[in-house]
Image (cartoon, rainbow, N blue to C red):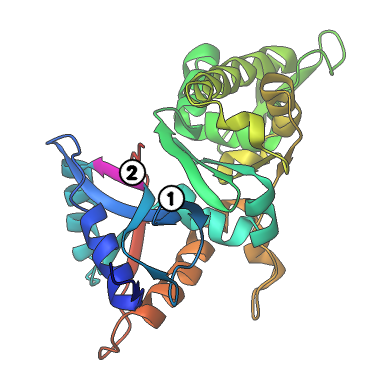
């Protein structure tokens, strides 16, 4: 039988076929991310272009989200008004600037803790192996503080940011935090350990739910570079220590790697997704035919599952 040289069109055909995978009816397709190619039974091929073969196959990681949430997000953006050219999974965008290619090759887990959700993406051997969303985020912590201490949400949010920690037992017995009123005068006092306990319990719940999800496929055993925590809630004191305790692998708070023109202010972990979107958009624009204007690529907290 004749062997043919694999070209770019063959790669495109395989990618198109990947989009035909069956997903839940209520979900919409977001991404198909290549893991490896297979040429005539030869596994683990990273770039088959130029190889000779009869049969080209590929393993893809598929990310999809709830259709109505995606549509509602797009409608909100168009009210600004902005053109929505693409929708990007949060953790995928963050990983573009939080991780280096070497870290992806050695195995790394990115946990992006936002306001409404916690998104994650796991790389092994440079390829995405798992991704998804836990329906808990920083807003849930703020609500817990508000309910537990009987204070307004705005004050609970400020208390979480200014004084909160996920570490228990590291404050003096009876140590308190003074809540100032809107005029700046001292008001209600709360025990620091009570505040930390509220935060600790919710973050622990989030990490334990995520660990159970990851344990279903065992890829976490191949993480050589550890866990990279980013997003607004990654700034909670001691969150990396709690992650190490629960996942039993090294963890760190991560921000965007140095980029040309990036000021130190934007290296805050809460901007990782936004900066990652810029890098993602640059890569997408380079692959697509040139159009007039620059398409806005917008990301929201969308559930992505394998």
Q: Secondary structure at mark 2?
A: loop
Residue bearing mark 1: 90
| Residue at point 52%, 51% (across, down) | 127
Pointers 2 and 1 in contact (CB under 8 A)? yes
Task: From the top left corner, tell me how far across and down residue 134 is, in percent.
Answer: 43, 29
| Residue at point 43%, 57% (across, down) | 37
Residue bearing mark 2: 302
Q: CA distance from mark 2 to mark 1?
A: 7 Å
Task: From the top left corner, tell me how far across and down residue 305 is, in percent.
Answer: 35, 37
Magenta span contains residue 113:
no
Residue bounds of the magenta highlight: 61-65
Front in this rendered view, residue 152 or 71 = 71
Label 2: few (<14), some (14–19) or many (≥20) C-alpha neighbours in 10 Å: many
Which sits earlier in the primary sequence, circle 2 or circle 1? 1
Magenta span contains residue 64:
yes
Please say if 93 is above or below 85.
above
């Amino acid at each position: 039988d004749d062997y043919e040289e694999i070209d770019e069109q063959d790669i495109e055909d395989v990618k198109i076929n990947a989009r035909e995978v069956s997903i839940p009816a209520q979900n919409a397709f977001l991404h198909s991310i290549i893991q490896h190619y297979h040429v005539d039974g030869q596994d683990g091929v990273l770039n088959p272009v130029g190889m000779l073969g009869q049969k080209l196959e590929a393993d893809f990681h598929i990310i999809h989200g709830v259709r109505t949430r995606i549509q509602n997000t797009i409608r909100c953006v168009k009210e600004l008004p902005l053109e929505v050219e693409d929708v990007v999974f949060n953790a995928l965008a963050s990983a573009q600037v939080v991780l280096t290619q070497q870290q992806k090759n050695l195995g790394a887990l990115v946990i992006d803790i936002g306001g409404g959700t916690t998104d994650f993406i796991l790389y092994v051997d440079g390829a995405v192996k798992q991704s998804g969303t836990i329906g808990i985020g920083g807003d849930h912590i703020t609500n817990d503080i508000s309910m537990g201490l009987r204070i307004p949400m705005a004050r609970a949010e400020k208390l979480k940011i200014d004084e909160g920690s996920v570490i228990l037992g590291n404050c003096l017995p009876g140590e308190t935090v003074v809540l100032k009123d809107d005029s700046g005068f001292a008001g209600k006092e709360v025990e620091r350990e009570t505040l930390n306990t509220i935060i600790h319990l919710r973050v622990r719940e989030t990490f334990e739910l995520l660990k159970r999800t990851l344990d279903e496929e065992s890829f976490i055993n191949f993480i050589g570079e550890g866990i990279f925590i980013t997003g607004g809630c990654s700034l909670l004191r001691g969150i990396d220590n709690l992650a190490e305790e629960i996942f039993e692998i090294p963890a760190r708070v991560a921000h965007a790697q140095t980029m040309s023109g990036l000021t130190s202010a934007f290296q805050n972990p809460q901007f990782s997704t936004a900066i990652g979107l810029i890098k993602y958009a640059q890569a997408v624009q380079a692959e697509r035919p040139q159009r007039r204007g620059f398409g806005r690529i917008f990301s929201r907290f969308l559930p992505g599952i394998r």
